[in-house]
Amino acid sequence: MSFPLLTATAVLPAVGAIATAAVPAARRTAAKWLALLFSLATLALAVLVLVRFEPGGARYQLTESHAWIADFGVRYELGVDGIGVALLALTALLIPFVILAGWHDADPLEDARPNRRWRPTQGFFALILMVEAMVILSFEATDVFLFYILFEAMLIPMYFLIGGFGDRAHAGGDEAAATQRSYAAVKFLLYNLVGGLIMLAAVIGLYVVAGTFSLSEIVAARADGSLSMATGTERWLFLGFFFAFAVKAPLWPLHTWLPNAMGEATAPVAVLITAVVDKVGTFAMLRFCLGLFPEASTWATPAILVLALISIVYGALLAVGQRDIKRLIAYASISHFGFIIMGIFAMTSQGQSGATLYMVNHGISTAALMLVAGFLISRRGSRLIADYGGVQKVAPVLAGTFLIGGLATLSLPGLSPFVSEFLVLVGTFSRYPVVGVIATVGIVLAALYVLVLYQRTMTGPVKDAVRTMPDLRIRELVVVTPLIALLLFLGVYPKPLTEIVNPAVEHTMSDVQKTDPKPEVEAAP
Amino acid sequence: MSATVVHSLWTTAAADRVATIPAPKIEYAQLSPVLIVLGAAVLGILIEAFVPRKGRYHTQLFLSLVALAASFAAVVALAADGYGTTRKHIAAMGAIAVDGPALFLQGTILLASVVAVFTFAERGLDPESHGKRVDSFAAQPASVPGSDSEKAAVRAGFTTTEVFPLALFAVAGMLVFPAANDLLTLFIALEVFSLPLYLLCALARRKRLLSQEAAVKYFLLGSFSSAFLLFGIALLYGYAGSVSYARIAEVVDGTVQNVSPALADTMGNDALLLIGGAMVLMGLLFKVGAVPFHMWTPDVYQGAPTPVTGFMAAATKVAAFGALLRLLYVVLPGLRWDWRPVMWGVVIVTMLGGAIVAITQTDIKRLLAYSSIAHAGFILAGVIAGTADGISSVLFYLAAYSFVTIGAFAVVTLVRDAGGEATHLSKWAGLGRRSPLVAAVFAVYLLAFAGIPLTSGFSGKFAVFKAAAESGAGALVVVGVIASAIAAFFYIRVIVLMFFSEPKPEGPTVAVPSPLTMTAIAVGVLVTLVLGVAPQYFLDLAGQAGVFVR
């Protein structure tokens, strides 16, 4: 038996989580280094997966399959396609930066009573690694049940990360911060849990209909006609799955937990939510909704496109109106998730490969913007835009990196999000021109909210409270520089990514039995 | 029908039997699990009478554990001999079934009882009373609360050990209950385990009035439901002319041979059957704690000494569900189309009722009581599936649930303030800061109750919902999922309270338990995680055990 590479990519961070949690209370710094070490080792394994993966090869590669719970028809089945590999790499890449950026976020307050047993720092980094392990495994799972378990279980560490380690920069003082934080954590958990439980009903329903949880078996059986579902059944099951993913992604009108969660969490945890965990939702739409229920996906497309459009415009409009930096980024993310979902359900190869690239690029660009915003907020102790002004004169490097992150968010050509946004729009336009046109409103609004944010915080007269603000430190530069380099590189040369993703998208397109619309060229008169 | 015909039901039978009274043939080996426990209980009473006070605690604890372990060994031996599968049959002149479900449930009850006895025996939590280490049970239960004799007993540092034989009697009754194969045995088993439980409820050392009130409520409502059960039995006997499960089932199915004139007259009377069946069902649903027969649950769970609550919530539920399964699958399958719609209603209101009312609770024990009602609803969803998968999923759920329950109540005993256990939820605020380990363990239990994947609660819930969905009860699954979501809300509220609230300065302390309670809690966590991550072996076991003898 060959080395179970995919399992290893998930087991390694899980082991790291346990090891980090076990570090004694006094050795906080050691715990941080240990966590960083494990996340880097995971990144190395992810690179190995990337190298071993053959873009033109079989649909699912590096597969593993073991018996698990025979009574439920559940197997431990792993395998990655191009989409999974891309997101796996993104996750493994972002976690070291998240850990570095959150280096001091969970240090105990100086006036805290010494307590031998209370080890928040160790807990913080252990939980981050736990989330990483579950997210990575969920990108690899090709068994619906296994995926469901991870989809639900990852809520628990996430919940403790949001509720237990909030943003210390809070206007209302510690008491209000604690209340709002636990409100945000509970809201996050309840929304996602309800989504997950509805999916559970659909998962059980799927088993009753199909008799197996294996994704590849079901897809194959659907393709050769040996498994047929009644139209009504298929649609209900589709809705059950889609609801859970739409909560996670999040899609309007199920998005309201995201601004709370991202606002109250520390910046690195906010990145973890939007750049890593939420991607599981959009990824699952591609892999499970389209793969398992092609007919119902086509049936639901118009409604989903409308919801995606509302997400795009509504998220962008609310971002324009925000006074809180982190909530602004949260609403911008909602708008971007609208683009991703629109790309997926446009049912064209450009749209879907664009959506996949979008997931990766949005991860990187949001991470850059959010983490720099976090550095900014930790300096001033406030999340309100109005409390800043003229930062670029005091801390030019910080302002510069913030600008690049912002420009990536508004998809400036030359930075990688442009490529994906362009592909999504082209893909949508070729099948649904009206939808494509309306979606461009989101781009215009993106320019508005990003540039206004920059203008209000970074330019203008230097505010007193900002005057002594230090520029980025070495640790912070180490976090930001590689992300920006990556944004530039993938913006100019996206080919390595598209090469991996495109074959997988072709497979998905054939699942839903769609071909790209032929370009209509009017004959020259 | 004429009076003489009814009369002939017993007069003619009696005349025949007089000539040939057969010596009862009792398969002692197959009844050994019950007999061992009963014998130990009797021995326990003798110990109370003859062993000096100083030595009683250790003797009783030793005896109880050995008896339960030996009884469990007997169950395992019977199962290994194939009595659970190929050699299943009916023992003791048709009174007791020895089959897969009976053995599986007896094993579960015994293991849960072992863990429960650990918590009964805990003497490290209450502050020492006049130099003696005391447990959670009253110094002298016979004395009136607040009276001089009680004060004297407390001052003398009395500790009593009658809980051990009482618990053993209750366990013996519970062992018979799911195995009972005729209605009279069913009723007797019910009384045998109920009476000691009523007493155990009244034995709390602290808050004695609350405890006695709980016992009286439990006793009154319990007797009421027993009366229903008995009346139902009478009507079923009137209908089928027999209390034997197999015979009643034959009459219900219409496959009965040798119809006597009396029987022919009564067996057409569906009113007897339906009302009788409904009343027996009601008696069992009361023990299970299903809505609308759940009213006793919160008060009794709150008032009883917490170790007893854990024992009741786990073992009683297992026994009662066992009896319910046997009744519905062996006696009344012919009435499936009659009971199924009614049970649908019961399942829905039980799941939703338990979950919704739990939200408003402010006492941790009442909260767990309502949660146990919601769980009864989930289990019932598997019960009414009416398939082999339904049986095995219920068996699995019961095994998983009972260990979580005992463990959770054991944690409740640890959190204390000056007035004993601090069960008001507000006192649990910030527990995660003060003692992270205890809070984390309790969080694991709560997540298991909520059915989060990778805990036993999820495996169990998945199993029963799958069985229900496969039997065409998809709507029930959807309601169950909604109820789970509601239930998750209040479990999570407790977690929020423990981890994200600031501890109060005058908050409770967490007592450091002796190895007994620690073992109980650790076993609970272990079972929760093992059944969550690798349930296959136990699902197999439940699957093999899922066939009733008839």
Image (cartoon, coloured by chain):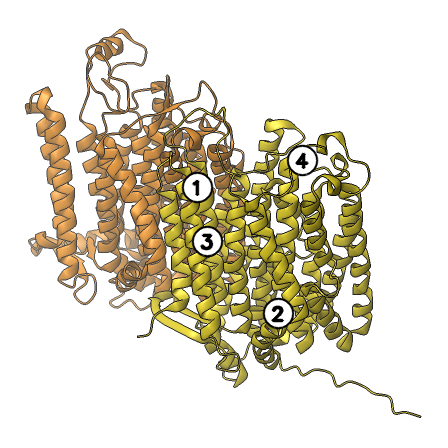
Chain colours: A yellow, B orange
Mark 4: few/some/many CA within 10 Å (<14, 14-19, 20+): some
Same chain under badges 3 and 1? The reply is no
Task: Name the residue at 51% across, 50% down.
Answer: A155
User: Relative to residue B331, is residue B373 depicted above or below?
Assistant: above
In this view, the mark in front (1 or 4) = 4
Image quarter of the C terminus of chain B: bottom left
Mark 2: few/some/many CA within 10 Å (<14, 14-19, 20+): some
Task: Name the residue at 68% across, 54% down.
Answer: A333
Amino acid of disc 2: Arg
Q: CA distance from mark 3 to mark 2?
A: 29 Å
Which residue is under mark 4?
Answer: A469
Q: Position of residue B477 (x, y in %)?
A: 50, 58
Which residue is under mark 1?
Answer: A123
Q: Is residue A228 left or right of residue A28?
A: right
In this view, the mark in front (1 or 2) = 1
> Which residue occupies the foreground of this view, B538 or A307?
A307
Amino acid of disc 4: Met
Same chain under badges 3 and 4? The reply is no
Sequence order check, earlier mark of 4 and 2: 2
In this view, the mark in front (3 or 4) = 4
Which residue is under mark 2?
Answer: A235
Q: Chain of mark 3?
A: B
Quadrant assignment, res B286? top left
Q: CA distance from mark 1 to mark 2?
A: 42 Å
Sequence order check, earlier mark of 1 and 4: 1
User: Relative to residue A39, is residue B255 depicted above or below?
Assistant: below
Q: Secondary structure at mark 4?
A: loop
Which residue is under mark 3?
Answer: B343
Q: CA distance from mark 3 to mark 1?
A: 46 Å
> Which residue occupies the foreground of this view, B113 or B209?
B113
